[in-house]
Image (tube, rainbow, N blue to C red):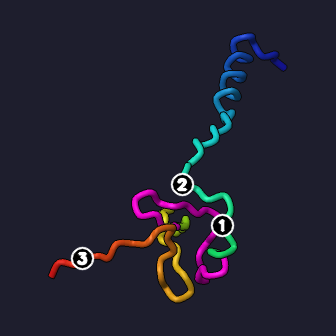
């Protein structure tokens, strides 16, 4: 049986080192993410909305939840049981062009 040469030992080491994974850095904290939803929001939120990742969008001041679908992950507006959006401030009326 032939022993490994120093060159082959180095090659094996480099191969194994190349297979190692570097732990991912923790993403920067998102100032819009909500750590814990207030009881008032939990009382009015509609069913079938994943509340594990919720944020307040600075553009509209409304709560949005992270939806993970088969193709993409995106944020969708959080709605009440009767279908209204949940916001931290009153929304301006929308003007629809005819």
Query: Camera-side residue: 90 or 53?
Result: 90
Q: Is residue 5 visible?
A: yes
Residue 51, picture quadrant? bottom right
Query: Camera-side residue: 28 or 68?
Result: 28
Given this view, does label 3 or label 2 mark the residue nearer the observer?
Answer: 3
Mark 3 and mark 2: Cα distance apart in space? 27 Å
- Contact (Cβ within 8 Å) of mark 2 with mark 1: no
Q: Is residue 68 visible?
A: no
* Direction from residue 91 to residue 84 in the image, left or right: right
- Contact (Cβ within 8 Å) of mark 1 with mark 3: no
Residue bearing the label numbered 3: 95
Residue bearing the label numbered 1: 37
Mark 1 and mark 3: Cα distance apart in space? 31 Å
Residue 44, picture quadrant? bottom right
Q: Secondary structure at mark 1?
A: loop
Going from the N terminus, do you reach mark 2 or mark 1 first? 2
Going from the N terminus, do you reach mark 3 or mark 2 first? 2
Please identify the dominant SS of the magenta region.
Answer: loop
**Other residues around mark 3 within 10 Å, as few (<14) / some (14–19) / many (≥20):** few
Going from the N terminus, do you reach mark 1 or mark 3 first? 1
**Considering only vertical position in the picture, is 47 above or below 55?**
below
Residue bearing the label numbered 2: 32
**Considering only vertical position in the picture, is 86 above or below 52?**
below
Q: Pick out the residue farthest to the left.
A: 98
Instruction: Give x and y (percent) for residue 35.
Output: 66, 58
């Amino acid at each position: 049986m032939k022993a490994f040469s120093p060159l082959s030992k180095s090659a094996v080491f480099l191969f194994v080192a190349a297979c190692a994974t570097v732990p991912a850095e923790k993403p920067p904290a998102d100032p819009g993410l909500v750590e814990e939803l207030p009881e008032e929001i939990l009382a009015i939120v509609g069913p079938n909305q994943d509340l594990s990742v919720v944020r307040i969008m600075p553009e509209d001041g409304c709560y949005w939840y992270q939806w993970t679908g088969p193709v993409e992950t995106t944020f969708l507006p959080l709605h009440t049981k009767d279908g209204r959006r949940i916001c931290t401030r009153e929304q301006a009326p929308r003007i629809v062009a005819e």
